Image: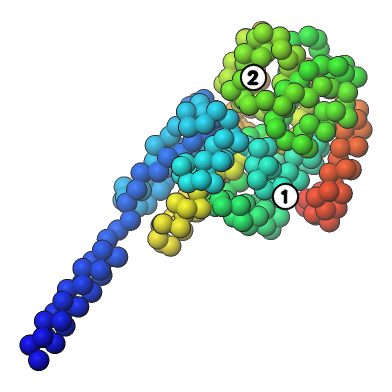
Amino acid sequence: MRKKAVLYLIALLIFLSTSYVSAAPYKAELRIASSTAMEHIYNVGAQYFAKLVEERTGGRIKFKLYPDGQLGKGERELLEGIQQGSIDIYVGSTGPLGGFVPAVQALDIPFLFRDYSHVDKVLDGPIGQNLIVDVDKAQMKGLAFWENGFRNLTNSKKVIKTPADAKGLKIRTMENPVHIQAWKSVGVIPTPMAWSEVFGALQQGVIDGQENPIAVILQNKVYEVQKYLSLTQHVYSPAMLIMSAKRWAEIPAEDQQIILQAAKEGAVYERKINRDNEEKMISELASKGMVITRDVDKTAWVAAMKPAFDAFSAQFGKDRIDAILNTK
């Protein structure tokens, strides 16, 4: 009888200690990595997201930002870190993400989006949510679509208004087959390379130009090595906030919901700042000596990139592409 009582007491103590541990609130300091400068819109948005989560968890979940590729040479390397669990959260463009989640490359088809309003309706609606599900299948947890912006062409050689003007130039692209094929169809020589290598390659004349949203061009001082900016807006470049699936699985459901909600609010905040500042940033680039070409022949660009548009529409599913085009 006494032996049974002792065993009962031991079992009770084990139960109570286990209950206490499981009831302990979750605490963590998570690492957010990007390949862009601290002042870039990704990191501005990440700071806002971090603030929301920290406030709503009473400081139990904190964040430390690692910009400028501190945790990886390029975005592809950062995404590999997310898959492996060595990086907690990634904020960056979806261009390299296509190597892990092929369906996301559909968003990189040239001239797919009409304007920012169209972007929001697609990415925040069923189409965007289905793509996030695809991300979740690749050992990652998609939190929300953020924004890089409409991409524009810079070069060190001449004013460019038409695709014919750009023919033969060596232009850095992301490691993204959609972008590469789109530029090939224009007669440009696409040169994929990690962003961390681009400034030096432009400076040394290894490449003639690059293409990026306005914020990237300004904040990375591309104007120091490029004279001409053409507002081609040939591709809309989304960004994503992505968490390691391994880390996500450790977080209690209640805190997961706080993180997801903060990621969505961060998306609204980050996109608004990016769009509100775009004209101001273009003016600043002009003040720093860049020649800004606004009157590009958009009809000619659309026609020149149509072979790439058609090829990738077929590859990624005409129904999906039509659904994006028809979103009102």
Q: Which residue lies furthest to the bottom in this view?
A: 1
User: Can residue 147 be seen in this snapshot?
Assistant: no
The dot on residue 140 is none
Res. 22 image quadrant: bottom left
Res. 1 image quadrant: bottom left
Residue 299: x and y in percent read 90, 30
Residue under label 2: 198
Q: Which of 269 and 226 is in front in this view?
A: 226
Total numbered circles: 2
User: Can residue 70 be seen in this snapshot?
Assistant: yes
Q: Residue furthest left?
A: 2
Mark 2 residue type:
Val
Query: Tag 2: Cα neighbours inside 10 Å, few (<14), some, or many (≥20)?
Result: some
Residue 244: x and y in percent read 50, 48
Specify whether 120 is left or right of 42. Answer: right
Among the two numbered marks 2 and 1 on one chain, the one whose residue lies closer to the N terminus: 1
Colouring of the image: rainbow
**SS class, disc 2:** helix
Specify whether 131 is left or right of 168. Answer: left
Specify whether 95 is left or right of 220. Answer: right
Query: Tag 1: Cα neighbours inside 10 Å, few (<14), some, or many (≥20)?
Result: some
Q: Residue furthest front?
A: 3
The residue sitting at 71% across, 55% down in the picture is 127
Disc 2 from disc 1: Cα separation: 27 Å
The residue sitting at 82% across, 22% down in the picture is 189
- In the displayed structure, 294 sits above or below 236; it is above
Mark 1 residue type:
Ala
The residue sitting at 62% across, 25% down in the picture is 195
Residue 320: x and y in percent read 80, 54
Residue under label 1: 103
The residue sitting at 77% across, 36% down in the picture is 177
